[in-house]
Amino acid sequence: MPWTTPGLSWMRVALFAALALCAVLVGVVACGGGGGHAPRQVGRLLETADEEGHRYRQIDQQDAPEVGVEVTTDTGKGWDVRLALRRFSFSPARTAPGSAVAGHGYAQLYLDGRPVARLRADGYRLPLTRVTRGTHHVTARLYADDRTVWAVEGRPVEATADLTASGADTTPDATGTGSK
């Protein structure tokens, strides 16, 4: 007994089976795949932008990530910058710009308002060569993966700590801490 429906050749049956499989696969991909849900975009884009042109993404205080900064000396080597985070996770290092997903992204580290490093981890070593004698401000600002700035009440989610470099060799002599 042949494996066909009366009036249909085996080629037609195979074609219908392939089309049905494609329809199922397209449905799975369109729905986020794997039985889960696609990440949901959050917040509202504001017209306000940072110094580099990245727009602010307004979110409610109760949903907002938080960041704190602590700068400690590492005698003769520079400063260790540590971030304390709440309701925020770093995206992997090779994450392509994509969607703004609640509580995910990266931190941009600034020294006296100038970008120093994009962070995908909570620590960074600021070398002696980057800092001249005097008091400086180290700021960590949180960004979504679509390169928007997380913001609450129109202000960026960020924290700043001061550090003081003294002497001709800019050996650190103070510890700075800061929060939003």
Image (spheres, rainbow, N blue to C red):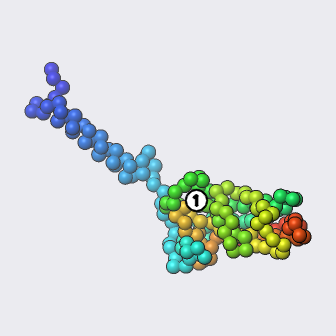
Query: Is residue 83 shown left or right of residue 120?
Result: right
**x%, y% of residue 12?**
17, 35
Q: Quadrant of residue 178?
A: bottom right
Query: Is residue 109 shown left or right of residue 148?
Result: right
Q: Residue at x 84, y 75 (%)?
A: 134
**x%, y% of residue 1?**
15, 20
Query: Could you tell me which secondary element the residue under label 1 belongs to?
Result: strand
Report how many numbered discs are placed on residues in the image.
Answer: 1
Q: Residue at x 12, y 33 (%)?
A: 8
**x%, y% of residue 26?**
33, 48
> In this orientation, which residue lies closer to the viewer: 176 or 93?
93
Residue neighbourhood size for the residue with mark 1, other residues' Cα within 10 Å, grouped as few (<14), some (14–19), many (≥20): many
Which residue is situated farthest in the left direction here? 7
Which residue is situated farthest in the top direction here? 1
Q: Is residue 129 above or below residue 11?
A: below
Q: Quadrant of residue 90?
A: bottom right
| Amino acid type, callout 1 | His
Q: Is residue 143 above or below residue 32?
A: below
- Look at the image and tell me whether residue 32 can be seen: yes
**x%, y% of residue 30?**
37, 52
Query: Is residue 80 shown left or right of residue 26?
Result: right
- Look at the image and tell me whether residue 160 can be seen: no
Disc 1: which residue: 104
Query: Is residue 39 shown left or right of residue 21?
Result: right
Q: Residue at x 48, y 57 (%)?
A: 39
Q: Residue at x 72, y 61 (%)?
A: 83
Image quadrant containing the C terminus: bottom right
Q: Quadrant of residue 3?
A: top left
